[in-house]
Image: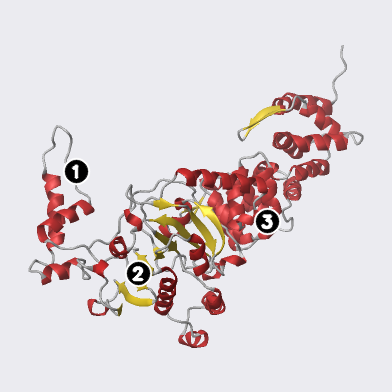
Amino acid sequence: MKPPRPRNQTRVLRTHSVITQLATSTVGGFCYDFGMDLYAVLLELADPQTRNAATNTLVGVGRAAVEPLVAQLLAPEPFVDDEIIVSVLHRIGPPAYRRLTEAIANAPLLDDPERTRRILELCCIAMDLPTDDLEKVATYANRIVNGDAKVERGWPLGPENVARQIGDDRAVAYAPLLIPVLAHASARDEAAAAFAKLGPATLPLLHATRRAPIPERRGALLALVRLGWRQLDTPDLTALARLIAAKIAVAKPRPIVPQGEWYAVETDDQAAVLDAFDLHDSIPATWCMGTQLWRNAMPYRPFEHDHSEHRDCTRMYVSPVLNGWTLVFGNPVLTREGDAHEREIELRRRHSITIEDVIEIDPPSERELRESRCIELSRRFGRAQWYSLIEDGGCGDRWGWCMAEHGRLQRYYEHDWYQDDDDRNFYNFGAPHPAEAGLRYHDVRQWLSDNGFNGNEWGSYTRDARVRVENAEPTPWGAPRALDDRSLWRQFQQVTGIPDLATPLNVAAKASIDPAGFGPHTRVQGHGVLALTVCGLRKGHHGAFSIDEEWINPYSVIIE
């Protein structure tokens, strides 16, 4: 008769099959085949004579070793000391954080309060989290792990909420909890934004995550570029440069409706354009990368809502040469303007600008800046133009253009759709440019009334068209489809003879080049670059951009 097996040995052998199975596994898309018995390594970890070698082995195994290590940490009677397990998990680092976060989230479910507190402390030590407020750590972890299923006051308490709170509180000490969120599809962007708010103190953590073969490494790259492109490791920078170069070689500029400001200068000398706008650290960029900020910007002055970050003035995009013209998107800040601009930003950070502030700063008006820039650019390049197009569908709608040739201002026009008709042409200088010929400045109702039509004719026309489609009988080819607004507008023009509205895009199409009118007829020379203004030099290039993506062929929102 065999002697009974010791209790501890029975427990160890019971976990042997689980550990052996984990030794050959696929984790996060990475295959691990270590040809080793993790059970035997864990036994060596319990032996002081073999502990160092076993620790190095488990750290080298990485994420595949995390589950058996955490299982030991949570076991009621572990055969390896708690502190030893924690030291190994601490050395493994970010690959262990997802499982440790789950352990923290589920620890309050244990029956023994003392053991619960002990487990929370050990997990926090392993993740470099503070241990002075375990309840807060547990709450964060619970929302990260189980938050999608929880609702408070009608709002889901998902991991994105935790990321936002940690970022807003500038709680750097809790940054390790954001690592698992970097692998969360719907919360990854929020976690990256939180790391950007937490700042450079999180760089070692992000670099360790980026170097590990775990799903979170992609999100770590996103967070790193938000902190600054100079923070990327050389392999990432090299791969990024190669990808951009490959896309530039085959991609062509696609039509866009800009949301913001841009300049057009008649030149093919990109270096001279960079010098004229006082731009620095230019890097090659695809058309998709370069125009992203102005395709998706907020209404009037892109990103005006956050002056403290200089988001609307840090960089500009200089396009390739397009039919002999170079487009420059963004708001320039020249060196000589830097001090006044910085003072304005500082005041806006504190409160809304007052009359006293304006007197103190004494800045030139936006119109004066645009006019002087166009005049200076035209002295250097012959012809220079400024355009602005802000369409948010509300009271912020406005647009304008400024044109200069050979050092002389020819035209300045700015149209604010929120003003009454009598005030809409307040910002107006010079006779209409030849590119404005055949275009109208008033809305549809006024033009129709002035030309013998009912002012509501356009509304009636569109309403009747919809009714005709709704009442039409189905055909063998299916139900009739309603015409889009653009097609209806073209039909209406044929009936009434009403001209197109004088918009920046319509004027640019005749005066230089229309960003929304690119096609096979557009001659493209060279490639575009993203470059930093004086403001941007403080932080350098930063942010995530789409190198190549599809978007709907656009048209201006306002056609009336």
Please, what secondary structure does the residue beneath circle 3 have? helix
Q: Where is residue 352 in the image (x, y as percent from the top left)?
A: 48, 78
Residue 118 is tagged as none
Residue 397 position (above or below residue 50): below
Please, what secondary structure does the residue beneath circle 1 have? loop
Q: Residues within 10 Å of mark 3 (few under 14, many from 20)?
A: some
Mark 3 highlights which residue? 202
The answer to whether residue 277 of the structure is visible from this angle is no
Counting residues from the start of the chain, the first of labels 3 and 1 encountered is 3
| Mark 3 to mark 2 CA distance (whole Å) | 38 Å
Q: Would you say 357 lies left or right of 225 here?
A: left
| Colour style of the rendered protein structure | secondary structure
Residue 223 position (above or below residue 426): above
Mark 2 highlights which residue? 396
Q: Which of 279 and 406 is in front in this view?
A: 406
Is mark 1 in CB contact (under 8 Å) with mark 2? Answer: no
Q: Which of 537 and 520 is in front in this view?
A: 520
Tell me where residue 183 sits by quadrant: top right
Q: Position of residue 367 (x, y in %)?
A: 39, 78
* Number of disc labels: 3
Q: Would you say 267 lies left or right of 126 here?
A: left
The three-letter amino acid code for the residue at tag 1 is: Arg
Residue 454 position (above or below residue 83): below
The three-letter amino acid code for the residue at tag 3 is: Thr
Q: Would you say 458 lies left or right of 261 here?
A: left
